[in-house]
Amino acid sequence: MKTTAALLALYAAVEPSAAFMTAPVRTSSATRTSLQQTKDNYEFHRKLLETQFAISGAATVEDHIEEQEQSSTPSIDATAFQNFLDEQEQPSAPIDATAIQNSILRVAASTDRGQYASAAQKQSVASLVESLESNKPKQIDTFSSSATLPSYLAGTWELTYSTNQLFRSSPFFLAGRSTCKTQAEVDQYNWFCEMHRAALAISTIGVVRQVISRDGKLTNEFEVKVGAVPFVSDFLPFVKYSGGLPLTVDGAIVSTADATPMSMENKDDWQLYMDTVEIKGSNIPILRNLLDGDNSKLKSRDLSKLLEDNVDAYEVPRPVLRTTYVDSALRIVRDEDDNIFIYSRVSDSEEVTDYSNVMADLGVASLLEGFNDAVSKIYL
């Protein structure tokens, strides 16, 4: 219909008026030639339109014009028609995904995964993320239909950038947010998370990792370390030294959840069901043995069942994660508040990290080994 209307507009634009076609005028040879060309052009477009209308069943050009005038379809002029054609002939240029990702990674690297990003940097990354999301490539799932999650999401990923506190990528904190029912509760929870990070400012956040398995298991590994003896003078007053010893308390907070696709047609959006939280790889002597026991796990489902059975208003939190972009190297995820979490693929491995080889000695053995290699150089 739009094409027919455009052709009619073009016909009207080139049709000479009746007076112009019949009135006797004195003209020069050049003028007569120009008039003849105009008339020929008119006849050509008229025949073109009549051919179009013959195909559609219309009788004549005039009949079709009258029909169009009686309809509610607005007409367009020839200029608008040409502009329309120009737009169709010039598709938008594809984005340079690699360049955009490199720009994001530069900001991530200079701001410690977004922890120290300015408002301008966050806005810049948000715009880049939206560009990727609007050009999300189609991925092919190579797993069998029995797999819960697709092959292009399974594997090991490390958190590269976040618009929120890094620990809020954990299913545990996502579930905590999901318990909030009002905006006031959301604001309180956000404030609590800010204070939680401020209280742990002395700690250093290491790798934040997600391991996604094809059977729908999501494991979040949050590695952290803190100075074991941060201020020597607090323990040895006679030592005039404001620093600490190069000993650290290390460990990883590991939380797990089941990731269930929102639909079989869309396996990129998940609903999470929180499972366990535990500390692995602690290097604190004695405490390590206790933490490695199964009884040290926080089994959130047992707690949820207890609350369900005794609190009428309680609902098991099932936070939603949406994968808005994924390719072979990068994955962008948004939570229910549209906070952005960007992950880089490390490998296709679905195996969680083995922390059993971490020595429970506060790093003393490593410190002595380094001192020997650098200073004493005593080898047996």
Image (tube, grey):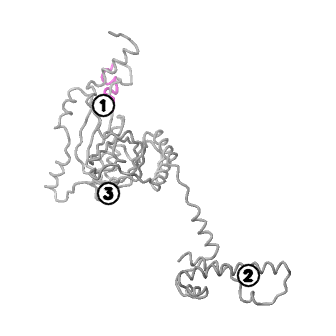
Q: Relative to the observer, which residue lies in front, 259 or 273? A: 259
Q: CA distance from mark 3 to mark 1?
A: 36 Å
Q: Position of residue 251 (x, y in %)?
A: 29, 33
Under mark 1, the amino acid is Asp
Q: Secondary structure at mark 2?
A: helix
Under mark 3, the amino acid is Ala
Q: CA distance from mark 2 to mark 3?
A: 75 Å
The residue furthest left is 309
* Part of the protein shown in magenta: 225-237
Question: Tag 3: Cα neighbours inside 10 Å, few (<14), some, or many (≥20)?
Answer: few
| Residues at marks 2 and 1 touching, judged by CB atoms closer than 8 Å | no
Q: Which mark is residue 34?
A: none
In this rendering, the answer to whether 337 lies above or below 378 is: below
Residue that mark 1 sits on: 250
Q: Secondary structure at mark 1?
A: strand
Q: Secondary structure at mark 3?
A: helix
Looking at the image, residue 334 sits to the left or right of residue 309; the answer is right
| Residues at marks 2 and 3 touching, judged by CB atoms closer than 8 Å | no
Residue that mark 3 sits on: 184
Q: Nearer the viewer, mark 2 or mark 3?
A: 2
Q: Nearer the viewer, mark 3 or mark 1?
A: 1
Mark sitting earlier along the chain (2/1) = 2
Mark sitting earlier along the chain (2/3) = 2
Under mark 2, the amino acid is Lys
Looking at the image, residue 141 sits to the left or right of residue 314; the answer is right
Q: Position of residue 229 (x, y in %)?
A: 32, 26
Residue that mark 2 sits on: 39
Q: Position of residue 234 (x, y in %)?
A: 32, 25
In this rendering, the answer to whether 108 lies above or below 270 is: above
